[in-house]
Amino acid sequence: MNVSPNFSPPIKLMAPYFLLSALFYLLSMLSLFTLEISVGITDFQLLAWVHTYMLGFVMMGIFAAMAQLGPIVVETKHYNVSVFKYLWIILLIGLLLMIYGFLEDVTYLLIGGSTVLFAMLLYAGEFLLTLKEARRKTSITKAMNMSNFFLLTGILTGITMAAALTGLIPLNPHDILNIHTFGLLVGFVILLIMGISIILIPMFGSSARISDNEFSSSFYTVSSGVLLMILSNLFLEDILKNLSYLFTSLAIIFYFYQLFKMTKSRKRNTHDIWAKSMYVAFISFCIAFILLLSYLYFDELLYLKSGLWLLFIGLFGFVIIGNFYKIIPFLVWFHIYSPLIEERAVPMLHELLPERLAHLQWFYSLSGLFLTTIAILTENDYLFRGAIVLLSVASFIFFVIIRKLLMLKI
């Protein structure tokens, strides 16, 4: 893999994405204090939180990571890297309008959703044109392409739901909720995590990389699962939904096996902050998978809520934060310090990250995740609010670390 400054955008260009992602993670944790543990899964206050977390923290983080890693993986320059100068502004405006729409005036949902769609179209269009020039054509590049299709499908169904809520079209929003959530959570976020982790785990974890054919089994199976969920709204609803759940489950089982193979092949077992974050993320993924399957079988809402919670905070949260701790110091060192190696003494890469703070953040996050999950399963509001304090402290430390890294200068 050719890690070239010609492929990777300058750290200054991507700094707003990293900083906003960390800021929205902090705001998401603090805003949990406004939610009751018994809040309904379709309550607008909860939906405002979900979109703050997913668009503000997760999507900003994905934009930042993919802008840096995507061209490196496929060994080509961005088609038009200047798009990223404005993309975060458009996404931020759309998100704020959507939050206002959920909390105050539903008519703003359509305006905000359309703005978010414009941001996603810019991102997907630029990324697809970049991938078109790829020197490396693998199942991972195919996964990147397919994830953009699912992203746009999820956003378009979201706008359709917003239009239905404002009365512009005669449709029950719940009729396409499965496409919206499945398309974004499974088709975009989880598929991207699966694809990129096949690159990052060998790179950061000193393990052997699985073959392209092995990852293809996960990629094609999970893509089939999401496509079946989309088609289930057109015909054979129950049959296609069950097939979708089956294909998605098989894809995740294949992926867990691939993770096991990579972990077992590690040449040296270093338990740094990245590795510890990945342990929590993928254990959370495994437990969330079991809880969500249990929900499908027992129809118990607590399993759904706790499974989604572990997916959001355990998998998405720890994967993004753990990789930020690797990616940002590398980018800062690569773009700021590496050109000066022959001119003056420069810090080592591992010296840029305040490791004690990062481990403290990890500990508070893990404690908060464990206690909030227990609180959701037992519907204990006092335990939930106490655990949110831990998550809030962890999110503040995370924001401080990211800001400190991005402020580093020569």
Image (spheres, grey):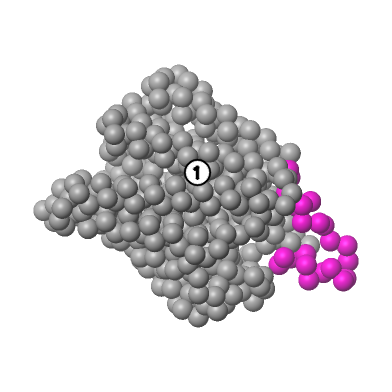
Residue 336: say if magenta.
yes
Residue located at (47% from left, 67% from top): 139
Q: Considering only vertical position in the picture, is 213 above or below 249?
A: below
Density class for disc 1 (Cα within 10 Å; few <14, some 14-19, many ≥20) is many
Residue 198: say if magenta.
no
Of 139 and 161, nearer the camera is 139
Of 134 and 241, nearer the camera is 241
Q: Is residue 92 visible?
A: no
| Amino acid residing under circle 1 | Leu
| Residue 102 at x, y percent in the picture | 30, 44
Q: Considering only vertical position in the picture, is 158 above or below 281?
A: below
Mark 1, residue position: 315
Taking the view exactly as shown, the residue that stands out farthest to the left is 170
Which quarter of the figure is the N terminus placed in? bottom right
Seen in the image, is 15 located left or right of residue 24?
right
| Residue 208 at x, y percent in the picture | 64, 57
Image quadrant in which you'd find residue 3: bottom right
Which quarter of the figure is the C terminus placed in? bottom right
Magenta extent: 334-355
Q: Considering only vertical position in the picture, is 329 above or below 121?
A: above
| Residue 381 at x, y percent in the picture | 41, 21
Q: Secondary structure at mark 1?
A: helix
Residue located at (46% from left, 29% from top): 373
Residue located at (48% from left, 41% from top): 285
Q: How many marks?
A: 1
Of 322 and 345, nearer the camera is 322
Q: Considering only vertical position in the picture, is 284 above or below 387?
A: below
